[in-house]
Image: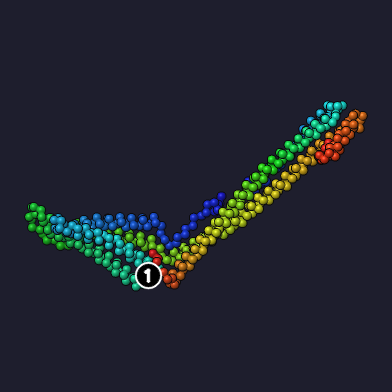
């Protein structure tokens, strides 16, 4: 059975080119989660980098601020770059803004490079220093070692680089997917208009059908009235038949020498007197 | 054919056979003794039967009229509903057309509030 479009109208989205609130919240939750991951990673890395100073607690607040800023930048810069690229693509922003987008992505790459290099450098330094300098018993002279691809700190640095780059790429992709291009918005607007037109046409058809139905109901009522009249006439004729048969029987009585004719004459006289009195004779009497 | 489009049950006209048999039986039984009072009793019975039959037919007619009025009212309500939703859809359609035209103009670069998107 087809859906009744009057009782349950179809849901037609009226907002065009916008994202739902729920999707917005999900996007920002995703960004927050990635910022948290980056913050944890970077705080470990910076603690390692500055361990000579951080063990005395001399740069605590500064380190927190730097960590937060870098993790924010790692996640936010690709997002902003994606939005700017979308707007340039949709010709909302000027084409020269692409310079800013390129600059921001360069800043992002430079930031990741600096973090990685600093992490590798911290590993090398830690290996050269031979552990924490403040600890008692760190007496052995450290052997100076250079850069090595297979050093654990180098590997850790590149793993961290991978995580940071992945979070940035994810934020870029999310922004790219959730900012609708203007062309798509226009297409959706036209589709919306078409949908509304189709719905209106179906409603017009339904209106015609409803009017037909009303007329049909009225016709049914008229037909019922006609049949009512017919039923009344049939009943009256049946009663007339009964009366006529009774009158015939009485007339047969009247012909043979019973006292019926006398009775009927008397009855007729009484009727006549009643009519003269003004009561009015009812139609269809037995003795008519 | 839906149920609402069908005619209601046909009128049942009261049968007169039993009444006729009863009256004839009584007439034959008191063949010798028919007088004015007996005839008046007959007439009274006939009139009572007629009134009863007419009332019965009236009852059926009333029932059918109520059903017909319910049908008409239901379909008129649906008509009103459809009219209201047609008006609403017309308004929505006008707004949507305006929005689509504005988006097209924005794509062509003629819109004053160009930087409101995204």
Which image quadrant is residue A198 in?
A: bottom right
- Mark 1 neighbour density, 10 Å: few (under 14) some (14–19) many (20 or more): some
Position in image of residue A213 (x %, y %): 63, 52
* Above/below status of B74 relative to A67: above
Give residue A145's position: percent from left, percent from top: 13, 61
Of residues A154 and A210, the one drawn nearer to the viewer in this rendering: A210
Q: Is residue A21 left or right of residue A252?
A: left
Q: Callout 1: residue from which chain? A: A
State the residue at coordinates (46%, 70%): B105
Q: Is residue B83 left or right of residue A278?
A: left
Q: Which residue is mark 1?
A: A93
Way the structure is coloured: rainbow
Residue that appears at 54% across and 53% down? A5
- Residue A67 in percent (x, y) is at 23, 59
Measuring 52% from the left and 52% from the top, which residue is drawn there? A8
**Residue A257 vs residue A221: left or right?**
right
Q: How many marks?
A: 1
Q: Secondary structure at mark 1?
A: loop
**Does A74 appear above or below A278?**
below
Q: Of B52 and A171, which appears nearest the observer? A: B52
User: Can residue B98 be seen in the rendering of this structure?
Assistant: yes
* Observer-nearest of A17 and A288: A288
| Residue B12 visible in the shown view | no
Image quarter of residue A279: top right
Task: Estimate the x, y position of residue A226 in percent, counting from the top left.
Answer: 73, 47
Q: Residue at x 38, y 64 (%)?
A: B118
């Amino acid at each position: 059975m087809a859906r009744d479009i009057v009782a349950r109208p179809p849901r037609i989205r009226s907002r065009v080119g916008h994202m739902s609130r729920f999707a917005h919240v999900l996007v920002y939750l995703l960004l927050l989660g990635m910022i948290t991951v980056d913050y944890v990673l970077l705080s470990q890395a910076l603690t390692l980098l500055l361990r000579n100073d951080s063990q005395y607690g001399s740069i605590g607040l500064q380190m927190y601020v730097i960590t937060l800023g870098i993790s924010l930048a790692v996640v936010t810069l690709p997002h902003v770059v994606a939005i700017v690229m979308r707007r340039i693509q949709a010709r909302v922003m000027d084409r020269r803004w692409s310079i800013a987008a390129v600059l921001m992505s360069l800043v992002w790459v430079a930031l990741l490079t600096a973090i990685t290099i600093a992490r590798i450098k911290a590993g090398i330094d830690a290996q050269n220093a031979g552990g924490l300098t403040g600890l008692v018993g760190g007496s052995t002279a450290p052997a100076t070692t250079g850069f090595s691809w297979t050093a654990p700190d180098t590997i850790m640095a590149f793993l961290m680089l991978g995580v940071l780059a992945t979070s940035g790429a994810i934020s870029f992709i999310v922004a790219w997917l959730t900012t609708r291009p203007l062309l798509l918005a226009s297409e959706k607007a036209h589709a919306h208009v078409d949908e509304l037109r189709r719905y209106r046409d179906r409603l017009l058809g339904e209106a015609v059908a409803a009017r037909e139905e009303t007329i049909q109901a009225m016709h049914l009522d008229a037909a019922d009235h006609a049949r009512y009249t017919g039923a009344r006439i049939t009943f009256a004729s049946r009663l007339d038949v009964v009366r006529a048969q009774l009158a015939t029987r009485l007339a047969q009585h009247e012909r043979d020498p019973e006292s019926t004719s006398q009775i009927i004459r008397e009855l007729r006289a009484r009727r006549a007197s009643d009519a003269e009195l003004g009561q009015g004779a009812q139609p269809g009497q037995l003795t008519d | 054919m839906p149920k609402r489009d069908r005619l209601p049950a046909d009128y049942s006209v009261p049968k007169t056979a039993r009444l006729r048999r009863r009256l004839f039986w009584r007439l034959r039984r008191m063949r010798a003794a028919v007088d004015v009072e007996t005839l008046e009793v007959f007439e009274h019975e006939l009139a009572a039967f007629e009134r009863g039959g007419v009332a019965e037919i009236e009852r059926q007619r009333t029932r059918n009229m109520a059903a017909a009025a319910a049908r008409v009212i239901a379909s008129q309500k649906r008509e009103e509903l459809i009219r209201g939703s047609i008006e609403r859809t017309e308004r929505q359609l006008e707004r949507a057309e305006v929005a689509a035209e504005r988006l097209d103009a924005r794509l062509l670069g003629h819109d004053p509030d160009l930087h409101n998107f995204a």
